[in-house]
Image: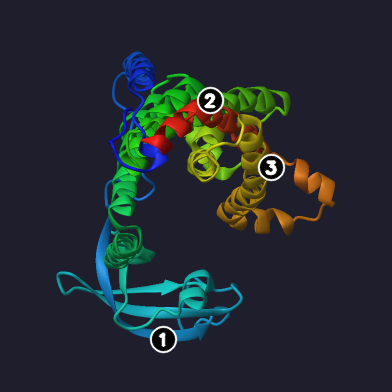
């Protein structure tokens, strides 16, 4: 946790403190390693057969050749699977990768929303021929591999141009975080490990990596880590209490019920509280590292200010940052759940009944608990930063050096 011998105050070497913090961080890393070992997924995750997997059913790639629009309530002189649906439908002629002609129909949710045109790449469900029926095709989804790669490359270029090496290191940290989720967190939960403990260990491992990778190994980063750990633990504990108190079963949505059906041994209520921990990591990282940086910079600009003065000024900055981060958190949740909220809003019920349905209440509780953890992490992080920032005597010695 040491520093180089530069001229800036935040680079002032403090070897004794650096050694102590190194031991503490290594102890935290060792505890995370032990926790991951103890909670590592046991056995393979049971794979469920998909809705389009089975004998005589397969997914094939195709390219759209001709799109003919028709009124869904008309049959165009021949039977149509779309009869009775309101809005514009389309009959589509396409070519499979092997040149085979495939004809299918699309309803308004696909045709009117995306305006399918010739040249579009799609994926189709192929139903093999039987004694009574010929080969049939149905629309499955669009092919998006190229678009996703292009969008990802553009993001990397933007980050590299604006964020330079720090931005690139942040992207590497994101990749590692996704790896932790995919290799450890998700399989551990699905194989019966306690979701909340898995979330705490996984979130701590992610924070250890992304903080030091993006912001460098320093006492300043360590102060942010301590604040983040408080936020993780508080959010996990508060999530357990609130989900249990509000009787959130985790099966109030279609996805939750499907997960329960596929993995009945998983504690769905615990998964809800575990998602609160994971969902708040990004904003928690932001608020803690920014708060610590504010304290360090104020100490350098005001070397003779007391700790109380620095704390008071940093809290003013933190309050502004927290207010903005609350908006970020709330709208991020609202945006991710927009389809569900729009659907539930169409139900004939009053606002209070709407807000207390499990599908909506789950998102509200997740937002409120995540926000509470974020708010409390700010002053705690500030206290850690004040405690670990250079003191007035060290500032004076640095000024005379």
Q: From the top left corner, tell me how far across and down residue 186 is, in percent.
A: 39, 32
- Would you say the residues marked 3 and 1 are in contact, meaning their CB atoms lie under 8 Å apart? no
Displayed quadrant of residue 304: top right
**Front of the two marks 2 and 3:** 2
Kindly identify the residue that appears in the image at 25 percent across and 62 percent down.
60
Instruction: Give the label on residue 387, or none.
Output: 2
Mark 2 vs mark 1, CA separation in Å: 70 Å
**Front of the two marks 3 and 1:** 3
Displayed quadrant of residue 359: top right
- Image position of 13 with respect to 143: above or below: above
Disc nearer the start of the sequence (2/1): 1
Task: Residue lying at the far front in this picture: please name it.
Answer: 400
- Image position of 380 with respect to 139: above or below: above
**Front of the two marks 2 and 1:** 2
Instruction: Give the label on residue 364, or none.
Output: 3
Q: Which residue is mark 1?
A: 68
């Amino acid at each position: 946790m040491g520093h180089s011998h530069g001229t800036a105050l935040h680079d002032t070497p403090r070897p004794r403190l650096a050694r102590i913090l190194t031991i503490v961080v290594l102890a935290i890393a060792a505890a995370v390693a032990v926790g991951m070992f103890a909670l590592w997924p046991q056995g393979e995750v049971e794979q469920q057969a998909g809705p389009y997997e089975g004998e005589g059913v397969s997914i094939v790639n195709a390219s759209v050749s001709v799109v003919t629009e028709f009124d869904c309530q008309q049959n165009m002189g021949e039977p149509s699977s779309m009869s009775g649906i309101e809005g514009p439908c389309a009959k589509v002629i396409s070519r499979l990768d092997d040149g085979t002609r495939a004809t299918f129909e699309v309803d308004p949710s696909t045709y009117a929303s995306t305006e399918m045109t010739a040249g579009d790449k799609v994926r189709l469900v192929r139903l093999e021929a039987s004694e009574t029926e010929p080969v049939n095709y149905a629309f499955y989804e669009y092919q998006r591999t190229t678009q996703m790669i292009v969008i990802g490359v553009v993001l990397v270029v933007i980050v590299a141009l604006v964020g330079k090496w720090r931005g690139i290191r942040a992207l590497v940290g994101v990749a590692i975080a996704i790896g932790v989720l995919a290799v450890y967190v998700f399989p551990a939960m699905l194989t019966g490990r306690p979701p909340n403990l898995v979330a705490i260990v996984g979130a701590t491992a992610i924070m250890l990596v992304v903080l030091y990778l993006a912001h460098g190994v320093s006492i300043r980063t360590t102060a942010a880590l301590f604040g983040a750990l408080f936020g993780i633990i508080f959010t996990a504990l508060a999530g357990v209490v609130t989900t249990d108190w509000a009787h959130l079963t985790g099966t109030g949505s279609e996805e939750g019920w499907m997960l329960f059906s596929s993995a009945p041994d998983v504690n769905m209520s615990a998964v809800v509280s575990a998602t609160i921990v994971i969902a708040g990591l990004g904003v928690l990282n932001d608020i803690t590292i920014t708060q610590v940086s504010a304290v360090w910079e104020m100490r350098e600009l005001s070397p003779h200010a007391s700790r109380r003065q620095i704390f008071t000024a940093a809290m003013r900055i933190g309050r502004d940052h927290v207010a903005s981060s609350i908006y970020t958190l709330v709208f991020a949740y609202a945006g991710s759940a927009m389809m569900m909220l729009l659907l539930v809003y169409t139900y004939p019920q009053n606002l209070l009944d709407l807000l207390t349905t499990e599908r909506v209440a789950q998102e509200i509780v997740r937002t409120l608990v995540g926000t509470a953890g974020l708010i409390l992490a700010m002053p705690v992080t500030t206290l850690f930063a004040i405690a670990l920032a250079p003191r007035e005597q060290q500032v004076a010695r640095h000024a005379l050096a």
